[in-house]
Image (cartoon, grey):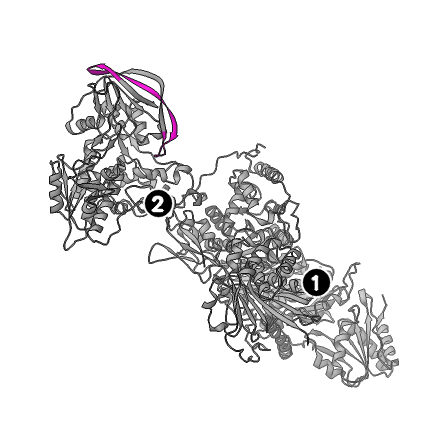
């Protein structure tokens, strides 16, 4: 165990490296990598590591990066790549393919605004574009969580009950380039947490055709199986958390992270680093006697509908903070969360921090104030703060 | 209630089922109805089952489901009549089927519907719609549909024009005119419920399973109406060989199994392979498809090579309980061949020969430098060793023949061509002018014959060449051959002519003698120049004598102008008709064989006819045999049907010969034959499979397998898509496409 | 017209003498199960099927893993979970063949597996959408054998034009005939200086077998280009596919050569530059029927191409 002062990009790289080395007794480690700001530090980190049985292929595009990962995964290797923004958009076809093939790829995505015009700062629109791609998705709040989520992501993705690729997301610059102390476990512990991958559908010499034709019923059945595996995450993830705690001696965050929720009558729901900002505003509000609380949605796929429903039951005012927008509709988190609420309440969408606008506690305080005044739901409110 | 109609079309990818449904919809739309049409697309290709649907109504159509309960069902191919093809056809509905089967042959399965049939495949094939393996019948069968449902031809024609299918309309019209139908024979059955289940509960393996993919089991053999088969065809060498030798058979056997096995193939038809391998004009080589390509296979040389290295004649015969006794008059090639054929079948043959030994022309006519006597001795010895009896030294007269006819079960006359063609020109009676045959007889049987001065030989056949070259060896100073036609028309073997020239014989073409001069003995010959006129009945151009003449001094003239049959041996009242002797119109058990019967004049013809007549004899005696008959050359595989790309060009092998300077003074055999049997590798093996694997390698489906039981292949028709590549790529036309 | 500058290379033994492919097919020396089993959905007479068969024989002693992008080749095996393929096959997305295969090959090499990874893609997946991926894998010299079966059309989607479609060919998207010459894929691949790039002829089994075996055996990136008859797309008789290839080769339209390490260029089959072959090639295919293309223009293309090719072989230029 060591404490290292790392950017979250490097933390992701360090976690991938340890996970990769843990598969040295298996089929090895690697993937295709392609640079894009603000993720490049992560793949650069990997290119500076030595692997007993591992190799990263410096490909010509994100699309091929995921293609190479699929080849690695089909061959039974543990595989990793990282991307961001338009890179993810370009990669999308193969992101979907990796999931449909049920390959336990782990990818770190740095959330960055989609262009053009070009903008390198944080926005969740890029990975939310992939919400239907069949991956599990985790949104992290700090450097340690990025590191932990990558290790846990492998454990979850490779579980034979799951076999679904995992996307670990972190906010551009706010996390990716921000250096903080990070607890890095020894390889020995990681080896214990991540046994060698034994992919049941690994391609060997047997005559199997993967990905020929599905007729309607085959597709129905394959989608059902995929959906059922997503459902099993609720059974497997707590096991992963328990194992994580047992091996590393610290907890792995829950799918939904509550803050001062016990008697909260105003709840702010957010993802990523926004939640930290929100917590500061909650404290301030509480100090003023306003019963505010915060929910951070860490796991976006599978969507924690039951958990959110329980937390939000009976809360009169719910503010959903989206750092993304589904144009023509509103925030994606809002549109998904509101389905979990069964009672009459004010459930208001605040789209905030698009294009990397710096969300400060005062903005959260404004939201608390705004929703406190509302007696009914309004149109999604887009806040320009940049 | 709206008047509406649902139509389902069952076709195969490439047959145009979707277009068929579209034609029907377009025709109805042209008649002012609302129409809808669409295909049920799958991933399968040319030949795979496809469904298409058409809906017609007098109200706007909103239903976009597939058609489950059609009123009209079109089946574009009767191989599509699977279990579920008729599913949902409403009671009393119409089934229009493309089939060649007669309407009445279709069973009770169709008794509850109105059934109509048309042979659209045949019509479309004739109109060349589609390819040979995938005939497109959509536009044709739509014509039949129009007839059944009263769509006017004019409407249909306009529809075809609208859809850009005008060129297919004549086929549609033909189907319109030829469709036949019968009404339902039984009352409609009550409709079963829930045939198409609403939900599918069949288990599907997840993609995460450790799977091995089983074969598809897709029976693609039903995709085509064509099918390749292995079919041996007539090789030109076999068609051309007068002896009926299985030429392609012995060449390929030599190549594959060596000379002993090849000799066994030859021995089935001839005991005189060593003889024919030396003196045959080799019509087989004329017919050989390789001739046009890079030179005929040296078949004669190979026949000789085999017989020089291993005995050809069979050693064992079929034992008969009561063999027939057959007398053969004449111990030349025809007689020997007939005796051999009879002996092989276990019958007793006795040959009567006037000379001291069997052989006929092989000893009296053909010089030893061409045909070594030990070859003749050996091959006749082989025939005799089968139990054939030889009685030599007696020339038969009619009385003796009559006696033989009484004594033996049958008699075969094989006395050859004893009548010699003379010349009726002034001076023909002069001394020094002699029949070439007589000269050769003296040279060959008596020995020590001498010639001197200038010898002129008249004629262009092998006898002429033999005379000329024998005259040289007998001491002539120079020899000239005069022939009335051109070199191309000389009947002599080409190599013989060339060898004669090498030895110094001079050839004068298109010359005909018109007079001899001399006092008591010939001293000069007058030759007229000849031009070539119209072809005569033999196909050769007729020589026309001109006024231009030239004179040559000469000391001897040898006539080699041809021979004819001599029938003086027949008793009074006996008459030869073809190959059988008759008396008073009644056939006798007396036959004629060889030159006597046919006048063909070569050893190989004599062998073939000897065989044939032996067969006729046995047949006349009540045996169940098929006498040999020359196959029809027109059925031989032509060179255009071979896949020549598979054959590298290679020059024929050459026989080695004594140097000309050495040989012209000696009677020792000039030709030493081929150095080895590798020339057989050049054989195309026309029409005969050699197991070259080309079909197997090119079969896109990989469904041609070698049979272990014999030397052939088998095709798994369950999967054969009938593309025809195997047949097209077969180097030697040993395969054929058949239409189902 | 062109004159060949060299004599025809000596041919191998005549077919009559030694069975095709040396008689190894369906023997103990062959694969126990073919790569393409009976029951595929391919059209009758499909050139791709023949390529599979030849690859199957050539790889008899080799374990292969195959990557096929979206193309006819991934529809051939039929419906899940069945398959006409008797070897491990992965379907990649259209552009990703060489990328997915890179992953497989890297892991195989990393683990010392003897497996050879083969990419099998059509002209659309090679010349067009997969070009960047292919180029990158070639440039990285990945240990892959990439086989492009080129039917000069998007066959799987019903016959649209690709950049491999030759001048004069009608497709559903060039109904009046393609006006541009096809992309010179082999030169492009050779320019990556890959260890081996060659065109192969389905009509010359021995040459093709030699190349397939060599290409399977060599390490690094190998590229094979196969002109593959498509009776459906070419509107030709299924039986005549191989003969069409012969015409294409004899006329010089389809040059058969190999390039080693991007430098050494060897012409394997000398064309006759035969006008009759060229005319027959065009006449036998319905796809050229509507074209107003003059054969003169094609001949000029052939002449220019061979002039360049001759200069690369170092054997002098062609008399024009």
State whether the magenta stretch is mostly helix, strand or loop.
strand
Q: Nearer the viewer, residue A177 or B494?
A: B494
Q: Which residue is mark 2?
A: B632
Q: Are there few (<14), some (14-19), or many (20+) residues within 10 Å of tag 2? A: few
Residue B45 shows up from this direction: no
Q: Nearer the viewer, residue C182 or A327?
A: C182
Instruction: Based on the picture, tell me whether residue B433 belongs to the magenta stretch.
Output: no
Q: Is residue A127 left or right of residue C313?
A: right
**Residue B484: image location, x then y, percent:** 33, 25
Q: Which residue is mark 1?
A: A88
Image quarter where the N terminus of chain A lies is: bottom right
Q: Nearer the viewer, residue C303 or B179?
A: B179
Whether residue A379 is situated above or below residue B174 in the rendered picture? below
Q: Are there few (<14), some (14-19), or many (20+) residues within 10 Å of tag 1? A: many
Q: Which mark is residue A106?
A: none
Image quarter where the C terminus of chain A lies is: bottom right
| Residue depicted at 29% across the width and 16% down the height | B552
| Residue depicted at 11% across the width and 43% down the height | B403
View extreme (right): residue: A373
Give SS at disc 1: helix
Q: Is residue C191 left or right of residue B186?
A: right
Chain that bears disc 1: A
């Amino acid at each position: 165990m060591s404490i290292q002062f790392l950017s979250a990009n490097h933390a992701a790289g360090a976690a991938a490296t340890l996970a990769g080395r843990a598969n040295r007794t298996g089929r090895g480690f690697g993937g295709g990598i392609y640079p894009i700001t603000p993720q490049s530090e992560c793949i650069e980190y990997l290119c500076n590591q030595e692997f007993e049985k591992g190799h990263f292929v410096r490909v010509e595009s994100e699309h091929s990066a995921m293609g190479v990962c699929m080849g690695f995964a089909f061959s039974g290797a543990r595989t990793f790549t990282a991307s961001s923004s338009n890179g993810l958009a370009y990669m999308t076809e193969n992101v979907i393919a990796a999931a449909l093939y049920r390959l336990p790829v782990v990818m770190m995505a740095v959330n960055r605004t989609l262009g053009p015009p070009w903008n390198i700062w944080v926005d969740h629109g890029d990975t939310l574009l992939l919400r239907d791609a069949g991956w599990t998705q985790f949104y992290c709040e700090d450097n340690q969580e990025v590191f932990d989520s990558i290790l846990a992501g492998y454990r979850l993705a490779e579980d034979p009950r799951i076999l679904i690729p995992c996307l670990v997301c972190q906010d551009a610059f706010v996390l990716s380039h921000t250096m903080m102390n990070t607890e890095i476990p020894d390889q020995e512990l990681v080896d214990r947490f991540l046994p060698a991958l034994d992919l049941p559908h690994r391609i060997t010499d047997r005559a199997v055709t993967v990905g020929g034709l599905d007729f309607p019923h085959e597709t129905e059945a394959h989608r059902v199986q995929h959906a059922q595996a997503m459902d099993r995450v609720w059974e497997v993830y707590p096991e992963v958390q328990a194992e994580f705690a047992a091996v590393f001696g610290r907890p792995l965050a829950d799918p939904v992270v509550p803050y001062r929720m016990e008697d909260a009558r105003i709840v702010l729901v957010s993802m990523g680093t926004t939640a930290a900002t929100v917590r500061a505003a909650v404290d301030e509000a509480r100090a003023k006697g306003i019963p505010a609380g915060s929910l951070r949605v860490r796991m976006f796929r599978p969507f924690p509908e039951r958990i959110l429903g329980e937390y939000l039951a009976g809360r009169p005012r719910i503010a959903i903070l989206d750092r993304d927008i589904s144009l023509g509709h509103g925030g994606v988190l809002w549109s998904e969360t509101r389905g979990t609420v069964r009672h009459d309440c004010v459930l208001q969408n605040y789209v905030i921090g698009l294009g990397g606008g710096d969300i400060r506690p005062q903005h959260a305080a404004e939201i608390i104030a705004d929703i406190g005044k509302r007696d009914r739901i309004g149109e999604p409110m887009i806040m320009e703060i940049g | 209630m709206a008047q509406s109609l649902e139509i389902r079309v069952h076709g195969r990818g490439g047959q145009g089922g979707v277009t068929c449904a579209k034609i029907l919809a377009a025709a109805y739309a042209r008649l002012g109805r609302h129409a809808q049409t669409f295909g049920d697309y799958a991933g399968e290709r040319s030949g795979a089952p496809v469904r298409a649907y058409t809906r017609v109504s007098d109200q706007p159509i909103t239903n976009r489901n597939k058609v489950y309960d059609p009123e009209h069902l079109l089946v574009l191919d009767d191989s599509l009549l699977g279990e579920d093809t008729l599913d949902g056809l409403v009671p009393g509905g119409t089934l229009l089927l493309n089939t060649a089967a007669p309407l009445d042959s279709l069973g009770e399965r169709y008794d509850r519907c109105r059934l109509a049939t048309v042979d659209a495949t045949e019509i479309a094939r004739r109109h060349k719609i589609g390819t040979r393996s995938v005939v497109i019948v959509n536009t044709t069968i739509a014509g039949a549909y129009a007839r059944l449902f009263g769509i006017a031809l004019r409407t249909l024609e306009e529809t075809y024009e609208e859809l850009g299918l005008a060129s297919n309309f004549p086929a549609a019209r033909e189907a319109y005119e030829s469709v036949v139908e019968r009404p339902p024979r039984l009352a409609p059955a009550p409709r079963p419920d829930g045939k198409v289940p609403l939900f599918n509960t069949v288990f599907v393996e997840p993609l995460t399973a450790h799977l091995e993919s089983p074969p598809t089991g897709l029976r693609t053999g039903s995709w085509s109406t064509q099918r390749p088969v292995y079919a041996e065809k007539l090789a030109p060498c076999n068609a051309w060989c007068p002896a009926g030798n299985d030429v392609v058979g012995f060449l390929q056997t030599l190549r594959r199994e060596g000379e002993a096995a090849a000799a066994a193939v030859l021995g089935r038809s001839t005991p005189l392979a060593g003889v024919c391998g030396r003196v045959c004009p080799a019509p087989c080589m004329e017919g050989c498809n390789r001739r046009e390509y890079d030179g005929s296979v040296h078949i004669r040389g190979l026949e000789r090579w085999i017989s020089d290295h291993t005995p050809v004649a069979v050693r064992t015969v079929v034992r008969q309980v009561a063999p027939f006794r057959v007398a053969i008059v004449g111990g030349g090639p025809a007689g020997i061949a007939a005796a051999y054929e009879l002996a092989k079948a276990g019958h007793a043959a006795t040959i009567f020969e006037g000379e001291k030994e069997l052989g006929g022309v092989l000893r009296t006519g053909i010089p030893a430098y061409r045909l070594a006597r030990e070859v003749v001795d050996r091959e006749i010895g082989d025939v005799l060793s089968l139990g054939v009896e030889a009685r030599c030294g007696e020339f038969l007269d009619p009385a003796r023949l009559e006696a033989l006819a009484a004594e033996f079960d049958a008699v075969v006359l094989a006395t050859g061509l004893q009548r010699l063609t003379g010349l009726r020109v002034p001076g023909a009676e002069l001394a020094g002018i002699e029949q070439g045959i007589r000269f050769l007889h003296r040279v060959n049987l008596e020995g020590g014959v001498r010639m001197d001065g200038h010898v002129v030989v008249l004629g262009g056949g092998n006898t002429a060449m033999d005379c000329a070259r024998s005259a040289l060896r007998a001491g002539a100073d120079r020899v000239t051959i005069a022939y009335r036609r051109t070199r191309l028309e000389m009947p002599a073997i080409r190599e013989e002519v060339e060898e004669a020239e090498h030895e110094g014989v001079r050839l004068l073409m298109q010359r005909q003698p018109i007079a001899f001069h001399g006092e008591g003995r010939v001293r000069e010959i007058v030759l007229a120049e000849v031009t070539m006129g119209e072809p005569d009945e033999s196909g050769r151009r007729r020589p026309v004598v001109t006024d231009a003449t030239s004179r040559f001094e000469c000391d001897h003239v040898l006539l080699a102008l041809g021979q004819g049959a001599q029938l003086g041996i027949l008793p009074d009242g006996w008459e030869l008709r073809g190959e059988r002797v008759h008396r008073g119109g009644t056939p006798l058990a007396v036959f004629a064989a060889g030159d006597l019967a046919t006048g063909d004049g070569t050893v190989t013809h004599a062998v073939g006819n000897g065989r044939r007549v032996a067969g006729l004899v046995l047949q006349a005696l009540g045996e169940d045999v098929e006498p040999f008959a020359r196959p029809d050359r027109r059925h031989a595989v032509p060179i255009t049907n071979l896949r020549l790309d598979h054959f590298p060009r290679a020059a024929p092998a050459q026989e080695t010969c004594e140097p000309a300077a050495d040989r012209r003074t000696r009677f020792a055999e000039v030709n030493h034959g081929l150095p080895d049997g590798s020339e057989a590798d050049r054989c195309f093996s026309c029409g005969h499979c050699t197991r070259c694997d080309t079909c197997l390698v090119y079969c896109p489906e990989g469904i041609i397998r070698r049979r272990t039981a014999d030397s052939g292949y088998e095709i798994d028709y369950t999967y054969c898509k009938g593309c025809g590549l195997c047949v097209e790529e077969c180097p030697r036309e040993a395969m054929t496409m058949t239409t189902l | 017209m062109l004159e060949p500058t060299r004599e025809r290379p000596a041919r191998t033994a005549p077919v009559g003498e030694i069975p095709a492919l040396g008689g190894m097919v369906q023997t103990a020396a062959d694969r126990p199960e073919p790569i393409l089993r009976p029951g595929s959905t391919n059209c009758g007479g499909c050139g791709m099927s023949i390529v599979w068969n030849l690859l199957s024989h050539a790889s008899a002693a080799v374990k292969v893993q195959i990557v096929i992008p979206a193309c006819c080749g991934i529809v051939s095996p039929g419906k899940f979970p069945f398959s006409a393929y008797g070897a491990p096959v992965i379907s990649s997305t259209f552009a990703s063949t060489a990328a997915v295969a890179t992953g497989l090959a890297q892991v195989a090499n990393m683990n010392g597996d003897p497996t050879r990874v083969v990419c099998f893609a059509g002209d659309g997946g090679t010349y067009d959408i997969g070009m960047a991926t292919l180029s990158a894998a070639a440039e990285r010299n990945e240990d892959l054998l990439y086989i492009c079966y080129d039917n000069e059309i998007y066959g799987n989607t019903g016959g649209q034009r690709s950049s491999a479609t030759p001048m004069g060919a009608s497709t559903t998207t060039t109904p009046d005939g393609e006006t541009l010459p096809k992309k010179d894929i082999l030169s492009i691949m050779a320019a990556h200086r890959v260890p081996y790039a060659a065109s192969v002829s389905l009509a010359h089994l021995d040459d093709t077998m030699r190349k397939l075996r060599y290409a399977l055996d060599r390490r690094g990136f190998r590229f094979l280009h196969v002109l593959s008859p498509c009776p459906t797309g070419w509107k030709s008789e299924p039986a005549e596919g191989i003969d069409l290839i012969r015409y294409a080769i004899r006329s010089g339209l389809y040059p058969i050569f190999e390039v080693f390490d991007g430098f050494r260029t060897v012409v394997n089959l000398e064309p006759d530059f035969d006008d009759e072959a060229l005319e027959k090639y065009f006449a036998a295919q319905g796809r050229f029927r509507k074209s107003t293309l003059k054969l003169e223009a094609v001949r000029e293309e052939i002449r220019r191409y061979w002039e360049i090719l001759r200069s690369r072989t170092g054997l002098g230029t062609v008399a024009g």
